[in-house]
Amino acid sequence: MQELIDILHREACSLVVRAADGRLTTYNKPGVRDLIWLLDNEPDRLRGAHIADKVIGKAAAALLVQGGVVEAYADVLSRRALSLLEASGMEYTCSQMVDAIVIPEGDNRCPLEQIVGDAQTAYEAEALLRQHFRRMTNDE
């Protein structure tokens, strides 16, 4: 895991994935866009993977669980994500634990955490996220 953390910081990316086959890949999109893309396009890359991420909130945690990730590290981990991670049996560590993911603008609470706030399972959270992204796409 330390290798993934080192890559995360050295390359200033947002996500590092070591697939079950050992292949390492890095990603840079904000939020959960890369995780959604991986679930839709390369699900085998997540199944059995170890990942290092800058920020894991409840939304990202749901996608990691749905993807079958086995171990995750986050620079910042939201307590709101813990129930999903623990229910899945995923191992996790973090540099900093926070009550909620916040952003500098608006009401400060991450919009994705608000969207999945009432979800009880990773499946429910993923469905809420996909519904949100479909609405955003249709509005454009």
Image (cartoon, helix red, strand yellow):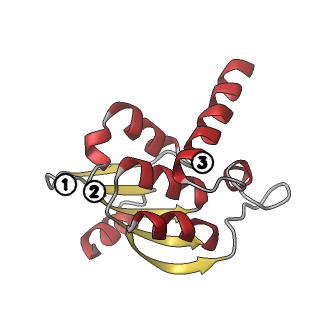
Amino acid residing under circle 3: Ala
Which quadrant, please, contains the N terminus?
Answer: bottom left
Q: Judging from the image, what secondary structure is the residue with disc 2 in?
A: loop
Q: How many labels does the image show?
A: 3
Residue at the extreme right: 107
Amino acid residing under circle 1: Ala
* Residue at left offset 34%, top offset 52%: 68
Left or right placement of residue 75 versus residue 38 in this view: right
Where residue 35 sits: x, y (%)? 45, 45
Q: Residue 49 has which mark?
A: 2
Residues at marks 3 and 1, CA–CA distance in whole angstroms: 25 Å
Q: Residue 125 has which mark?
A: 3
Residue under label 1? 20
State if disc 1 and disc 3 touch (CB < 8 Å). no
State if disc 1 and disc 2 touch (CB < 8 Å). yes
* Residue at left offset 65%, top offset 23%: 137
Q: Is residue 136 visible?
A: yes
State which tag comes first along the sequence, 3 or 2. 2
Residues at marks 2 and 1, CA–CA distance in whole angstroms: 5 Å
* Residue at left offset 33%, top offset 51%: 26
